[in-house]
Amino acid sequence: MAKLDVKTPRFGWALTGSGHFFKECLEIMGRLPDLDVFVSKAAGEVIRMYKQDLALPPTTRIFKDTTASAAPVGGFYYGVYHTLIVAPATSNTVAKCVYGISDNLATNVFAQAGKCRVPSIVFACDTAPEMDTEAPKGMVKVYPRRIDLENTERLKTFDDTTVVESLADLEAAVEARRKWLTSSSS
């Protein structure tokens, strides 16, 4: 496989339409070097609803879901990405990933990462029968459906995919990946 002339392979981060720990995910993104952000149409709506600015490092590239073929996914074929993070991931995104449906930018980058054996970290939102989550106007109680919980479990069986269920687990998985990248480049 041909590689593009990329000096430093990058983190890819796909944002979906979930508000679950959305602000905290943006904070983690702001600490990552060499980052590309894939913003689905639903994520664009969430950014506006939660009145968030994407305060990201100046080297960050942002790709929005504006093409039918999700053209930005091509970088996965050429070694541009060493890691994909999908966080936060809606139950809709998790279900599509589980069943191989790649019809938006977030699900497309997940599919391409898998096809190119790029490790993925997915922060699934629906992980317990009863949860508190932040909505635009404050905290709310949600009750994920059985199918949502089952899909999260199915996703855990995917090759090269780490599914995390809490913000602390997401931070730990990202940090573990950074350490692994540092040690493997030495």
Image (cartoon, rainbow, N blue to C red):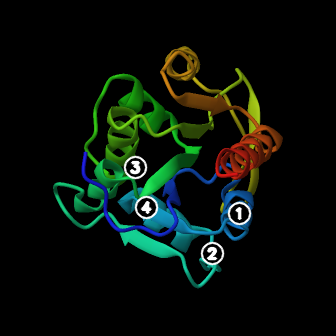
Question: Residue 23, which numbered label?
Answer: 1
Report the residue at 72% width, 61% height from top. Answer: 28
Question: Residue 52, which numbered label?
Answer: 2
Q: Amino acid at mark 2?
A: Gln
Q: Are marks 1 and 2 in contact (CB under 8 Å)?
A: yes
Q: Earlier in the sequence, mark 4 or mark 3?
A: 4
Q: Dot 3 corresponds to which residue? A: 106
As displayed, is residue 159 above or below residue 169? above
Helix, strand, or loop for circle 2?
loop
Give the left or right position of residue 2, taking residue 23 as reference. Answer: left
Q: Label 1 vs label 3: CA separation? A: 18 Å
Give the left or right position of residue 129, taking residue 92 as reference. Answer: right
The percent coordinates of residue 115 (x first, y second) are 32, 34
Q: Earlier in the sequence, mark 1 or mark 4?
A: 1
Helix, strand, or loop for circle 4?
strand
Q: Label 1 vs label 4: CA separation? A: 16 Å
Q: Between 185 and 77, which is closer to the camera in this rendering?
A: 185
Q: Are marks 4 and 3 in contact (CB under 8 Å)?
A: yes
